[in-house]
Image: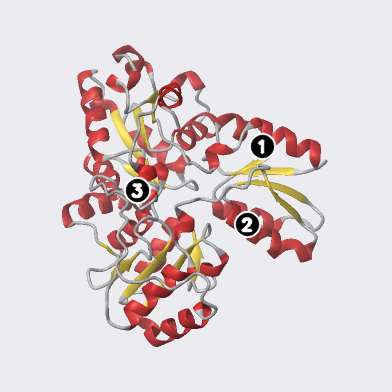
Amino acid sequence: MTTAQTQELDVQPTPLALLLLGREADPRSERGVECPGDLPSASDPDLVARARAAKEKLGDKVFVLGHHYQRDEVIQFADVTGDSFKLARDAAARPEAEYIVFCGVHFMAESADILTSDDQKVVLPDLAAGCSMADMATAEQVAECWDVLTEAGIAEQVVPVSYMNSSADIKAFTGKHGGTICTSSNAERALNWAYEQGEKVLFLPDQHLGRNTAVRDLGMSLEDCVVYNPHRPNGGLTAEELRAAKMILWRGHCSVHGRFSLDSVNDVRERIPGVNVLVHPECKHEVVAAADYVGSTEYIIKALEAAPAGSKWAIGTELNLVRRLANRFAAEDKEIVFLDKTVCFCSTMNRIDLPHLVWTLESLAEGTLVNRIEVDKETEAFAKLALERMLALP
């Protein structure tokens, strides 16, 4: 991307692309790139057998979690599958497991470490498996935002609500400032709770989930929402705009769900008459407004399970899951397609591949702890406070 294009998009150049290439490291980022040891070759025909053997050797000492967006080659070894919060809770419910191998991304492994016991060790097979959305809000940026809200005289009225897809630092900030965490399933309940505590909400880090929940579920107007851009002085907002807003949305988004457009919806309706459009609430507002159904990953799966035979569905979420669902329900004559014509996997989620999983399991089986994700105690305490508020939501 050229400098001119970067300026046009109103973002600042970051080293994230170099991080993904493994060419630099940034201690302020939630991602890392170090992977000690030699990875087995992706062409090794014995990878599946090696993974099975290592997992069998570890027995009950290991518990493998697989997020819905993982590759099929990895998901086959998961003891449980689900979304990020479900998997973190599943890990906490298995205290006998010494090792929790989280096949997902960095913030998910952090959440698992926060919710599991001190005796359990959470492992991420590839430390470079991060989340672009989570990286869009750093602790320093959010602290600066709070200073802006304080200078505008409204900080005492603001309740932070942070999406589960955020770093442990952001979850801790939320807990420290009286806020709660939410998932895409309970965002409406979280916002209703927040407005009982204060007059305004700072929603982190996904602007689309925050906007869609406020407008679609709570009946607010788009004018009630403003977007705080951490790359602009004072977030690009005046004190008057902040005082008038009910929802202060962080300028973050999911790189996968943000790709879906209104054109995608219109095109699939033309190509497949009678199709049902089902999208994730991380999609843009105009996409959500044009869809027939909107819901979390778990909602999408349950909707397709309950769908009648012969029905047609265009799904707006990560391609690994859509493809898996299409294969699963093909025998029931349910036509399931990806909403966009352009193939788009979650690039960081896909960093967890079979070679990394084999290397992880074999290392653990040999008694070598690798790629442990460990949240410091102070951060853990405040992050857990925010998570416990979510668990207590009515």
Please give the name of the residue rendered at 45% of the width and 42% of the height, measured from the top-left corner: 187
Q: Which mark is residue 291?
A: 1
At horizontal 32% and vertical 56% (from top left) the residue drawn is 33
**Residue 347: horizontal and vertical position, in percent?**
49, 51
For this orientation, the residue located farthest to the left is: 378
Q: Which of these two is toward me, 346 or 115?
A: 346
What number is the disc on residue 18?
Answer: none
Which numbered disc flags the more N-terminal residue, 3 or 1? 3
Location of mark 3 (residue): 19
Residue beneath the point at 54% across and 62% down: 71
Where 262 falls versus 322 (above or below)?
above
Residue type beneath disc 3: Leu
Q: Looking at the picture, which amino acid does disc 2 mark?
A: Lys
User: Is 360 left, or right, of 275 in this rendering?
Assistant: left
Say if residue 134 shows up in the picture.
no
The answer to whether 156 appears left or right of 191 in the picture is left
Query: Dot 2, crowdedness within 10 Å: few (<14), some or many (≥20)?
Result: few
Of tags 3 and 1, the one toward the viewer is 3
In what element is the residue under mark 3? helix
The reply, left or right, for residue 375 in relation to residue 12 is: left
Sequence-wise, which precedes: disc 2 or disc 1? 1
Q: Quadrant of residue 263?
A: top right
Residue 302 image label: 2
Residue appearing at x 23%, y 73% in the figure? 119
